[in-house]
Structure formats: structure tokens, C-alpha cells
Amino acid sequence: MTINFQEMKYQKEVLLNLPRERVIELFDNPENLPKWQKGLESFELIEGQAGQVGAKSKMVYLMGKRRVEMIETVTVRNLPDEFSGTYETKGGWNSVENYFTEEEGKTRWLMKTEFKFSGFMKLIAFLMPGMFKKETAKQMNAFKSFAESQEL
């Protein structure tokens, strides 16, 4: 049986008013995740060494009244330049590549995202592709607000 996926690729970027070293320090600390990822209830390492290539973690989000579980797998850890991974949940898979570059004491964060959907999520992605792009921008801006509000 062949599964026909709905695919979507896009990229978003944000400029943070912090040096790259500080951005990475905040971004790379899993204890900070609930401080900027709305709805994150838990982040639990299930395999490998935390934050390292091959590590798998279970993430649980409350989205409205729905609990969504996803598995994060770290695919690239080349900090401070790149941190990337895949995220799998029922009806969806996505790859996220995060790139960080320093620009005159500020940090440009570029996120390249690829989604593949099946089942009901395929229909949602087809009908509302903008929702995913908007949510990505919202998450990135939430991190920017969190990071810029932290004392050095």
C-alpha cells in the first residue's frame, strides 16, 4: 500500500538583538523550552544523549483541548551554526533545520521547514497551509521575546 503525503516546504527568519553565543546558550537549554513553546507540557529524553545527534525525546503539547505527542530526533548538532531535527506525530512528519549567523552583535535565525502529512492532517495542510507558516513565525518570535528578556 502506498501512502500519498501532502508536502509543504518553507522558511522563516528572525533577527534577535543578542549575540549568537547568548542565543545558542538559551536555545540549547531544554529547561527553557516551556518558557517559549506555548502548550509544551513535557519534554522527556527516551533514547541517546540529550541534544546530541541520534537522541530521541518525547514532547507532549496541549493544543486547545487536544494532547499532541511527538518524537524529536536530533539529526544535526553543529552549534553555534546549526541545530536540526525531525519531529514525528500521528499524521505528520517534519524536518526543521535551524541556522544561526552573527550580524554585528545580533543573531539571524533561519529556520527551514519541511512537512509531510497523511490522513486527516493531509486535508488540514491542504486547506490551511498558512496556519503552519504562521505558527512557525509565532514560535520563533516567542523565542526572540523570551531570549531578549533574559539578563546577561
Image (cartoon, helix red, strand yellow):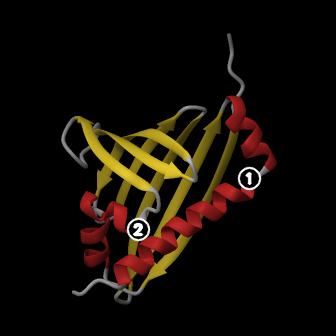
Q: Quadrant of residue 18?
A: bottom left
Point out residue 37 in the picture as x, y percentages from the top left corner: 43, 62
> Which numbered circle lies on residue 36?
2
Name the mark nearer the viewer: 2 or 1.
2
Quadrant location of the N terminus in the rendered image? top right
Q: Residues within 10 Å of mark 2 (few under 14, many from 20)?
A: some
Residue 142 location (% of width, % of height): 47, 72
Q: Is residue 112 above or below residue 57?
A: below
Q: Which of the two discs, 2 and 1, labels the residue nearer the N terminus?
A: 2
The quarter of the picture where the C terminus appears is bottom left
The residue positioned 18% from the left and 41% from the top of the image is 49
Return the residue found at the far left.
Answer: 49
Q: Is residue 151 left or right of residue 81?
A: left
Task: Say which residue appears at 37% left-offset and 84% top-offset.
Answer: 148
Please tell me whether residue 56 is drawn above or below residue 152 in the rendered image: above
Q: Is residue 127 left or right of residue 144?
A: right
Please give the name of the residue rendered at 24% of the width and 46% of the height, measured from the top-left corner: 52
